[in-house]
Image (cartoon, rainbow, N blue to C red):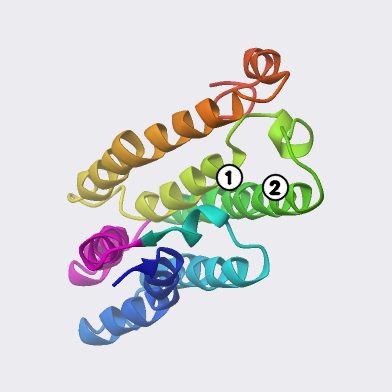
Amino acid sequence: MLIKQKYPIDFAKSITWLVVLGLIYYFNQFDNITAWIYFCLHGSYGIMWVMKSKIFPDKNWEKKAGILYTMLIIFGLMVYWAPAFIITMNSHEASLEVIVSAIILFSFGVYYHFASDMQKYIYLKYNSGLITDGLWEQCRHPNYFGELLIYSSFLLLTIESSLWWIPVLILSIFICIIWIPGMKRIDRSLSRFEGHEAYKKKTAFIIPYIL
């Protein structure tokens, strides 16, 4: 049986707030402001993702996968919950400076991720070819840059914990084996369009104007 990849992705994202709420309850972290901040950030991101999937979906997630790959997708997304376990199991509380920094990172991440995906969806709905203006003028993968900021905001909340390296390692692995190959694959696919080489030379890869 084949299942569209969007379904396990949307499922895992949609239950994130429930998982975090369950951890807060199970480990009695009702007075832990860091746990609630994480609940707000990661929980709301999951809900916004599902809304995005309904309103301006990414056709890449329309591809179908077998049961084993579907389970792998769900497991991979569950691994992203590592900061929630670290915060609640260890009663970890981040400093005010870290909390503020995480919220700022998350806010810019949401903007870049969802605004660039919306721009791409609307453009490709009525046109074909390269998107070279707006957020796509700053770098070739602004949606990935947004996700980088979003997930960095989650792990930042654990940066003062002795287990900070776990979410950092997880995100690094995903970047190396999934994100970077995926972005390079997109670049190769877009190379068929006229003007791609010139566009590639004048834009950053993922971090606007820098890298």
Q: Measured from the top left, where is residue 205 in percent x and y?
A: 55, 25
Residue 52 drawn at (x, y percent): 61, 66
Q: Reply above or below: 149 against 133.
A: below
Label 1 neighbour load within 10 Å: few <14, some 14-19, many 20+: many
Q: Is residue 188 above or below residue 91?
A: above
Q: CA distance from mark 2 to mark 1?
A: 9 Å
Q: Are marks 2 and 1 in contact (CB under 8 Å)?
A: yes
Q: Residue 143 — which label?
A: 1
Where residue 64 sits in the image (x, y, percent)?
Answer: 39, 62
Image position of 94 (left or right of 47): left
> Does residue 102 show up magenta in the picture?
no
Is 2 above or below relative to 155? Answer: below
Which percent across, then down, holds residue 75?
24, 63
Residue type, numbered disc 1: Asn
Identify which amino acid the numbered label 2 is placed on: Lys
Mark linked to residue 120: 2
Question: Does residue 97 sit above or below 138 in this rendering?
Answer: below
Residue farthest to the right, as pictured: 126
Residue 193 visible within the image: yes
Determine which of the numbered discs, if any, sits on residue 182 in the image: none
Decide: few, some or many residues near mark 2? Use Cα within 10 Å; few <14, some 14-19, many ≥20: some
Name the residue located 40 percent from the left edge and 39 percent from the top edge.
179
Q: Helix or strand or loop: what does disc 2 sit on?
A: helix
The magenta-colored residue range is 65-94
Residue at (57%, 67%) from the top-left corner?
A: 53
Left or right of 211 in this view: 194:
right
Regarding residue 206, the answer to whether it shows in the image is no
Q: Residue 13 versus residue 193: which sits nearer the camera?
A: 193
